[in-house]
Image: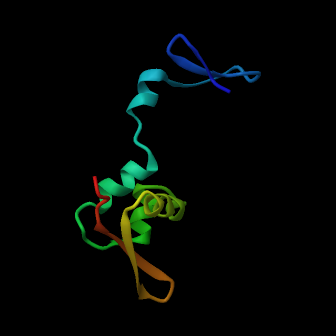
Amino acid sequence: MLKIIDRSYRIPHTGIVNLTWSMKMNRKTNLQRLLALLKDGKWHSADELASQVSFRFGHTVFEARQKGYLIEKRRVAHNHFEYRLAAMKAA
């Protein structure tokens, strides 16, 4: 549980102060980063997604699909894949 103290987050029982509130509000989620990258409709390599979204981007792709986004995956070589956003979620 996090408590807001002087616009920063203090993790109870540790004395650790995390990000300031304003910094926390400006951070993009992994889903937002994924959709921003894939919205051009072009194919993007798994390495690119790992570096720009998250090392564990597979869960973010799963989350996007659960929310109605159509993300395609294709194999380009043995153990190398590319992803693209084929259709945006209906409004």
Tally of numbered discs: 0
Residue at 39%, 65% in the rendered image = 48
Compare residues 69 and 49 and report the one nearer the observer. Answer: 69
Relative to 80, say whether 85 is above or below: above
> Looking at the image, which is closer to me, 86 or 20?
86
In this image, 86 relative to 50: left or right? left
Q: What colouring method underlies this structural image? A: rainbow
Q: Position of residue 88 (x, y in %)?
A: 29, 61
From this view, report whether residue 53 is shown above or below residue 20.
below
In the rendered image, residue 63, in percent from the top left (x then y), is placed at 49, 58
Q: Position of residue 73 (x, y in %)?
A: 41, 77
Task: Check the image and name the residue furthest to the front.
Answer: 91
Residue at horizontal 63%, vertical 24%?
2
In the picture, residue 23 is in which quadrant? top left
| Residue extending farthest top | 6
Q: Residue at x 49, y 61 (%)?
A: 57
Residue ID at (68%, 27%): 1
Question: Relative to residue 14, is residue 41 drawn left or right?
Answer: left
Would residue 78 be found to the left or right of residue 68 on screen?
right
Query: Which residue extends farthest right?
Result: 13
Residue 31's x, y, as percent? Answer: 42, 52
30 to 69, vertically: above or below: above
